[in-house]
Image: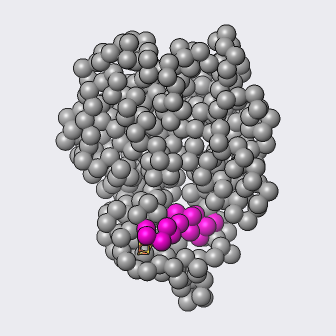
């Protein structure tokens, strides 16, 4: 069992974590707050609390946004504690069939490719595609989800893209950008060509494992993380960096793999050895002088106003927030929203499928913030945020469109 007690004993009950807690915002109750979660976990470890369905429901309501970790004076890792209790919950209650199917697909890239291809063919039969926001509304669950692309990003290009350079970077694309938002990868390839980098497409990459980690399916996390680490080791010496244009995926690989391997030191050491070369895409692009030069040469070319939402796994987990803003501001007008660091309310598979009412409360607040900026475009380096923000804007009648920062940069260079 993970040692919950040590963290519970450390908590000084100061309550600094509560004002920024996403679930406490949606459900203002002490039990659904970081301090409340930690107290319950201490009671559980002492044998005073049973993991019954009510307690399960409480622990499954955390959005894993890490706001609490960011502000806690004792640096208590509430997100890691929740992920570990969810693993115990999954062992006791099992995992819903549709999540097991989803995680099975994440483990099997070839079957996933076929499944998504069929999904593309049939998606127009029962759903309405909204072309302007690249999404569809499923009548059964009544929420907006991204539409599928005809061909995945990884299957659209050769494994090695030779741009005539002696420098190469690899791309880890993430599942949503691979199957749904394929223009992100296309834009990243175009930017890399313009700054003279070859690209290794790392076609044998598997899902980072974040959806399974947040749901407590540790067997899937173990499989995916180890296969990815072994694969990265085969090419890491041949590339300058592995770029991940997705905050959740890069946060998972760079930070959460280490948390997950807390009791597997050999694997922890292996991922930490690789981590120096793994970057969120804008973080690495920001370091490229040639990109700055090219953007400056083009000047402020767009009248559109952009606002930027900070994905939890970018700013709080990896400290990346300045880089996308500065790159965007070279070509667009920019306006900050009131609280860009407030979680969008995506929250993971369980929140989206079983607790969507909570996601809606948080999403409505984010949509209002975007509306108040009167911006044309809202951007965030995370496709999970994109799913949630697009859905929230749509529900609240806000006309702002969503663009990934890499798409904005590519437009600035080539439009
Ligand atoms: S901020 Fe940290 S120490 Fe203070 S109540 Fe929250 S979890 Fe406990
Ligand atoms: S991770 Fe987010 S939602 Fe969960 S307890 Fe911490 S602040 Fe609240």
Q: Nearer the viewer, residue 373 or 156?
A: 373
Residue 293 in view: yes
Q: Which percent across, then down, holds residue 108?
A: 72, 40
Q: Which percent across, then down, holds residue 219?
A: 72, 58
Specify whether 333 is left or right of 276: left
Residue 330: name its quadrant. top left
Specify whether 361 is left or right of 39: left
**Residue 84 is inside the magenta segment:** yes
Quarter of the image where ligand 1 sits: bottom left
Quarter that holds the N terminus: bottom right
Residue range highlighted in magenta:
72-87
Specify whether 354 is left or right of 393: right
Q: How many marks?
A: 0
Q: Going 70% across and 36% down the picture, which residue do you hit?
A: 205
**Residue 81 is inside the magenta segment:** yes
Q: Going 30% across and 40% down the picture, which residue do you hit?
A: 393
Q: Which percent across, then down, holds residue 69?
A: 46, 63
Position of residue 236 relative to residue 208, above or below, is above
Specify whether 217 is left or right of 341: right
Q: Nearer the viewer, residue 64 or 394?
A: 64
Residue 201 in view: no
């Amino acid at each position: 069992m993970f040692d919950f007690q040590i963290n519970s004993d450390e908590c000084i009950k100061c309550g600094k974590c509560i004002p920024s807690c996403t679930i406490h915002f949606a459900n203002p109750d002490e039990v659904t707050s970081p301090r409340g979660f930690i107290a319950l976990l201490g009671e559980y470890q002492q044998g005073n609390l049973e993991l019954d369905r009510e307690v399960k429901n409480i622990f499954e309501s955390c959005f894993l946004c890490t706001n609490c970790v960011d502000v806690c004076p004792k640096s208590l890792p509430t997100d890691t504690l929740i992920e570990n209790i969810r693993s115990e919950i999954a062992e006791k209650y099992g995992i819903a069939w549709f999540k097991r199917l989803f995680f099975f697909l994440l483990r099997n890239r070839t079957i996933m490719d076929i499944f998504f291809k069929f999904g593309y063919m049939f998606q127009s039969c029962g759903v309405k595609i909204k072309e302007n926001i690249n999404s569809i509304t499923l009548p059964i669950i009544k929420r907006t989800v991204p539409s599928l692309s005809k061909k995945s990003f990884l299957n659209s290009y050769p494994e090695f893209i030779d741009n005539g350079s002696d420098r190469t970077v690899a791309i880890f694309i993430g599942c949503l950008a691979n199957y749904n938002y394929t223009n992100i990868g296309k834009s990243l390839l175009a930017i890399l060509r313009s700054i003279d980098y070859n690209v290794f497409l790392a076609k044998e990459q598997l899902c980072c494992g974040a959806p399974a980690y947040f749901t407590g399916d540790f067997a899937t996390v173990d499989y995916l993380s180890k296969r990815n680490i072994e694969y990265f080791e085969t090419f890491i010496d041949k590339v300058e960096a592995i770029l991940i244009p997705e905050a959740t995926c890069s946060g998972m690989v760079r930070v959460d793999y280490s948390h997950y391997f807390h009791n597997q030191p050999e694997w922890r050491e292996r991922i930490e050895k690789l981590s120096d070369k793994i970057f969120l895409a804008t973080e690495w692009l920001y370091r490229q002088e040639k990109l700055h030069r090219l953007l400056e040469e083009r000047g402020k070319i767009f009248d559109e106003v952009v606002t930027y939402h900070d994905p939890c796994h970018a700013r709080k987990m990896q400290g990346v927030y300045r880089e996308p803003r500065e790159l965007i501001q070279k070509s667009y007008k920019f306006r900050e929203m009131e609280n860009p660091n407030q979680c969008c309310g995506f929250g993971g598979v369980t929140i989206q499928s079983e607790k969507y009412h909570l996601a809606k409360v948080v999403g409505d607040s984010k949509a209002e913030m975007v509306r108040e900026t009167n911006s044309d475009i809202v951007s965030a380096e995370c496709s999970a945020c994109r799913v949630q923000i697009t859905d929230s804007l749509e529900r609240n009648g806000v006309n702002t469109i969503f663009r990934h920062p890499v798409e904005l940069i590519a437009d600035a260079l080539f439009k």
